[in-house]
Image (cartoon, rainbow, N blue to C red):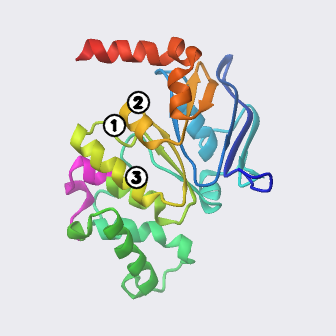
Amino acid sequence: MTQQQTPALELRDLRKSFGKTEIIRGANMVVRPGERVAIIGPNGAGKSTLFNLISGRFEPTSGDVLLDGRRINGKKPYEINRMGLSRSFQITNIFPKLSVFENLRCGVLWSLGYKYTLFRFLADLDDANDRAEELMRMIHLDRKRDVLAMNLTYAEQRALEIGITIAGGAHVVLLDEPTAGMSKSETSRFIDLIREVTVGKTLLTVEHDMGVVFGLADRIAVVVYGEVIAFDTPDAVRANARVQEAYLGSLEAQQTAEH
């Protein structure tokens, strides 16, 4: 990142407490435009809380979140979304009784300037329809155009959610455990999809699958007990003694035991 280049996302001494319990304890992170960052850490480390702080679902107890250099603390999630940040969730969040096409068209309307109007038929909105068709091809669901979202496979529903997440044109995308519950073959295809649809965008993802993490991320942020204890390239994180002691060593032992 050059001196003139503004970070896509920056956390400055970010803290979050619930009552007397401090969950996020002074997180600092600078994410470059176009960078792919994976956030890893043990269960209960505060990863989802960090996502909720960034996306506006929670307000920080102290510290700052900056999007393109602009402080977004206290803004509503929809306001942050309109500034160019969008996120998915651990639990698939789609419109089950709408078709694939209708789900995606809903996602593009606001970004194309269609706000609150009762006097236009959606079928007449050529730009919205064209963008929805483009997104369907991008997420490889064009053959499922008129299928209700509730009738898609789990992996297809996750793909649709990513389509909705990027539909509004966000340049910073947060994906919360995108491959959870998928088979190895589904995960492999899904990672290819994530790479494809986030070209030119800044990506933050929470992920437990180390194969996904080390294969996808430019840099990895390791969160332990609400602190970012390392934020570096995959090779540097893998070799970091503190990370090995706090997380990777115990994770590898657990995975060995499972197999």
The crowd level at tag 1 (other Cα within 10 Å; few <14, some 14-19, many 20+) is: some
Crowding near the residue tagged with mark 2, few <14, some 14–19, many ≥20 C-alpha atoms within 10 Å = some
Q: Is the Cβ of the residue at disc 2 closer than 8 Å to that at disc 3?
A: no
Marks 3 and 1, how far apart in space?
A: 14 Å
Quickly name the residue at label 2: 208
Label 3 element class: helix
Q: How would you rate the neighbour count of disc 3 (Cα within 10 Å): few for under 14, some for 14-19, many for 20 or more?
A: some
What residue appears at the point 40 percent right and 60 percent down from the top-left corner? Answer: 163
Instruction: Give, as a three-letter code, the residue at label 1.
Output: Ala
Q: Which residues are magenta?
A: 146-158
Pick whichever of labels 3 and 1 is earlier in the sequence. Answer: 1
Residue sitting nearer the eye, 47 or 147: 47
Disc 1 and disc 2 in contact, CB within 8 angstroms: yes
Mark in the foreground, 3 or 1: 3
Residue 125 against residue 109 in the figure, above or below: below
Sequence-earlier tag: 1 or 2: 1
Amino acid at pointer 3? Ile
Residue 103 placement (x, y as % from top left): 36, 65
Numbered badge on residue 223: none
**Residue nearer the viewer, 157 or 251:** 251
The label shown at residue 194 is 3
Q: Secondary structure at mark 2?
A: loop
> In the rendering, at what x and y percent does residue 181 appear?
28, 36
Task: Tell me the tag on residue 180.
Answer: 1
Task: Choose the circle earlier in sequence order: 2 or 3.
Answer: 3
Q: Is residue 1 magenta?
A: no
Image location of residue 172, percent across then percent down = 58, 54
At which x and y percent is residue 50?
59, 34
Instruction: Compute the Cα span from label 2 to label 3.
Output: 16 Å
Query: Which residue is located at x 21 percent, y 51 percent?
Result: 153
The alpha-carbon separation of the residues under discs 1 and 2 comes to: 8 Å
**230 horizontally vs 109: left or right:** right
